[in-house]
Every structure is written in structure tokens, then in C-alpha cells.
Image (tube, grey):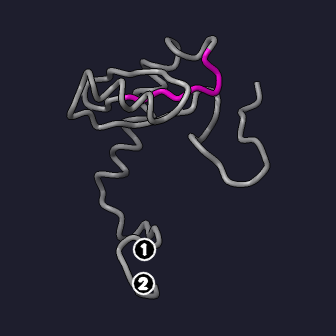
């Protein structure tokens, strides 16, 4: 891999990504599916849910920043995982919708 000028310009490389990031993803997805999804899905399609992977606490808001702020007020040390309700990803690039089909 080519060395870049600054740390901000680094390209994501799974071989150098810390193991804890994979654990956050796994824990966040598991919490959402097992405990949070059934509580937030109805009537909140497209909204963001911020989940503290250590406590299971969560907040729902229209955008990522609002959900994060609400959760951090309650749990200042939250290890946060974000999900866009009804979508496989929080954000996407391009013109195609990532909305899951039912």
C-alpha cells in the first residue's frame, strides 16, 4: 500500500484495523437485532438509533448528531454504534436507495 502524506488521508485497510473495531460492529449489530429493533422499528423508518454497546441504552433521532448528543447526555462514556432504521447502512454513496425490501 502506498504511504500517504498525512494521517487524515489514510485509506481504510482491514489488515491494519484494530481488532476492537470488529468487536464494536459485532456487539452493535447483535444488540440492535436482539434488544432494540423491536422497540424502535415501527413508525421510525429512516431515523437513526444510537446504541451504547456497553449498557444497551439507545436514543432515536432524525439525524446522527442528535441521536449521539442525546445518548451522550445520559451516558457520557458511551461506546456508540449507529443504525438507520429500516436500512442496511447509516449512509450510502450514489443514487441508488439501500432501503431493505419487505
Relative to 6, say whether 69 is above or below: above
Image marks 1 and 2: residues in contact by CB distance under 8 Å: yes
Q: Which image quadrant is residue 47 in?
A: top right
Residue drawn at (44%, 74%), measured in percent from left and top? 9
Q: Farthest residue in the left direction?
A: 77
* 20 with respect to 87 (left or right): left
Name the spot of residue 70 as percent of width and height, x first: 36, 24
Name the spot of residue 44 as percent of width and height, x first: 60, 17
Name the spot of residue 80 as percent of width and height, x first: 35, 36
The local crowd at label 1, few if under 14, some if 14 to 19, many if 20 or more residues have their Cα within 10 Å, is: few
Instruction: Please say whether residue 31 is one of the residues in the magenta stretch.
Output: no
* Residue placed most toward the observer, 57 or 66: 66
Relative to 86, say whether 11 is above or below: below
* Residue placed most toward the observer, 90 or 37: 90
Residue drawn at (52%, 15%), measured in percent from left and top? 40
Relative to 6, say whether 34 is above or below: above
Residue drawn at (47%, 21%), measured in percent from left and top? 60
* 5 with respect to 62 (left or right): left
Res. 34 mark: none
Q: CA distance from mark 1 to mark 2?
A: 6 Å
Name the spot of residue 39 as percent of width and height, x first: 49, 11
The local crowd at label 2, few if under 14, some if 14 to 19, many if 20 or more residues have their Cα within 10 Å, is: few
Magenta part of the protein: which range?
Answer: 44-51
Relative to 16, say whether 94 is above or below: above
Q: Which residue is mark 2?
A: 4
Q: Which residue is mark 1?
A: 10
Q: Earlier in the sequence, mark 1 or mark 2?
A: 2
Q: Farthest residue in the bottom direction?
A: 2
Amino acid at each position: 500500500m502506498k504511504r500517504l502524506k498525512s494521517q487524515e488521508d489514510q485509506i481504510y485497510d482491514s489488515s491494519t484495523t484494530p481488532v476492537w473495531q470488529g468487536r464494536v460492529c459485532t456487539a452493535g449489530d447483535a444488540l440492535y437485532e436482539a434488544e432494540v429493533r423491536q422497540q424502535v422499528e415501527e413508525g421510525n423508518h429512516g431515523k437513526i438509533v444510537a446504541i451504547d454497546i456497553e449498557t444497551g441504552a439507545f436514543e432515536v433521532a432524525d439525524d446522527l448528531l442528535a441521536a449521539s448528543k442525546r445518548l451522550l447526555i445520559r451516558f457520557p462514556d458511551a461506546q456508540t454504534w449507529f443504525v438507520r432504521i429500516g436500512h442496511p447502512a447509516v449512509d450510502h454513496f450514489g443514487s441508488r436507495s439501500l432501503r431493505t425490501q419487505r
